[in-house]
Image (tube, coloured by chain):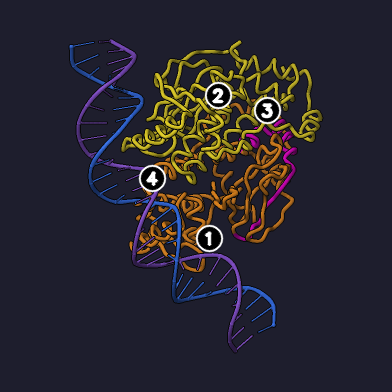
Chain colours: A yellow, B orange, C blue, D purple
Amino acid sequence: MSETALHHELSRLNFLADDDFEMLDELLSRRHTLAAGDLMVMDGDPMEQTTVVLDGWAFRFKDFPDGRRQIFNFLLPGDIVGMFALMFGNARCGVEALTALEVAAFPSARLVPVFQNCPRLALALSWLAGQDERLLHEQITRVGSRAATERMAHLFIELYLRLLRVGVDEEAARRLPLTQVMLAETLGMSHVHANRCFRELVRAGAAEARNSHVWLLDPDFLAKRGGFDAGYLEQQEVPQRTRNVAADHDVGSNCT
Amino acid sequence: MSETALHHELSRLNFLADDDFEMLDELLSRRHTLAAGDLMVMDGDPMEQTTVVLDGWAFRFKDFPDGRRQIFNFLLPGDIVGMFALMFGNARCGVEALTALEVAAFPSARLVPVFQNCPRLALALSWLAGQDERLLHEQITRVGSRAATERMAHLFIELYLRLLRVGVDEEAARRLPLTQVMLAETLGMSHVHANRCFRELVRAGAAEARNSHVWLLDPDFLAKRGGFDAGYLEQQEVPQRTRNVAADHDVGSNCT
DNA sequence: CGTATCGTTGACTCTCGTCAATGGCAGTGG
DNA sequence: CCACTGCCATTGACGAGAGTCAACGATACG
């Protein structure tokens, strides 16, 4: 099914009960698809929907008057957009579909009863939203304190591991739908320099560009070249104390 | 009172009822103080506490084996640390007190009943936590697509406006407890270059360094020099639809 | 068959990092 | 009271990394 990515990730937490998943399925029942290039969120628009990526890639970005664009991060299957949209007036950045995209969307207001009645699910969703913060920290580190080629290799491995984590198979996880211009806009360098760095990785036999995609040929090399420390992506167990708390506040059949 | 900053910010939302504030006061009743240099969170430690900064400065950072350090952002009065700590095993970055600090801390687990019984307060706290994301986006933009001196001026104005926003008076908001080494670690440049950029601002009469502090002399100039667009910091109204939702789910006296 | 996006390369320039040295200032212990 | 130490700020010199400009080939698309 198309929700495998999210289910895959949440199942691995080994934290949710069956009725949590039922509630989740209901939340995600309204599906639609977008074409590559469609805007999921336009900068400045009011935010009312919470969206979950089911399949495909998207990215968050901000365009500036002088033509520059900064890409903040990439949204992969299982990622949530606008978790707390309810409290924010207007979006301050855009979200664009990078590939054809399948998503589920629901009014953010529907999260309020979820928080009241399904504490486990609420915690799990907050956890997903919180993952994002770590990725942003890593992005700051990449751009702020790594050399250009290192940045690029590091980003490749991050995406590769994130894809593996949500259940994409090894083969597919090595194919990233990124152009060199987008790499430049993500990594804070000129597209010319992005090309020079990329060529270096190509010469090392670690990657290649075909068909407006990046193909990772040697993840081990890239991880080393990017000084990649997998710590921040490691799957973590839900602490026992959290399980206890969730159980204490379980309101059972209210959930669905 | 010491909680003025947080109250100030939440009051301006014009969203919480009296019993929300009562609940909040209870959450924040366990106070303590830290000295400058104390670690609030150590990288790798288990996270169980949610902490609110009441007075003083702190910062989030990550140290690397080779001695580099990246500072992600600064925590000012009213900011929350570890909102969703409940779901995360261990911290992946440190938080250090930059000045003497007054904080309130409570076990993250206490948020679960808050979410169940005080939807408005839960939304307001989530909103605070979500503010952080915008600041991280802005930090990425600074480091990724601005020139060095621009970055520095931009950061100064962001901090200045954030301080004003939480009720610090004009005079005090112009004094930032930052050394040039910290600026360098925040902005992704060498400390030598940080000094060069800073000197440029000093020569322009826009700032000066005294006593391990930065003093902002000409915010207007700095805002212009940093290409600062205040949009992302603007106070936003809570949308009417959100008020309605909160009212619908109000469970009244359960809150306290 | 034109047009646009993507990728690539060379040449030139300049921002920025590195290395090194110095001075001021505060704390500390003899 | 004064060496001693450490942190902070500052500056010059040098070189490397990265931006800019410009041009061109390849591929996809209508």
Dot 4 falls on which chain? B
Badge 2 element = strand
Residue beneath the point at 42% across and 27% down = A42
Residue A216 coordinates in the image, percent (x, y): 50, 25
Dot 1 falls on which chain? B
How far is disc 1 from disc 4 in space, using C-alphas? 23 Å
Q: Callout 4 environment at 10 Å: few (<14), some (14 to 19), or many (20+)?
A: some
Q: Determine the image quadrant of residue C11.
A: top left
Residue D19 coordinates in the image, percent (x, y): 33, 42
Badge 1 element = loop
Magenta span of residues: B99-124
Badge 3 element = helix
Give the labeled residue for mark 3. Answer: A124
Q: Determine the image quadrant of residue D18.
A: top left
Give the labeled residue for mark 2. Answer: A50
Residues at discs 4 and 3 in contact (Cβ within 8 Å):
no
Give the labeled residue for mark 4. Answer: B146
Res. B177 mark: 1
- The answer as to whether the residues below labels 2 and 1 share one chain is no
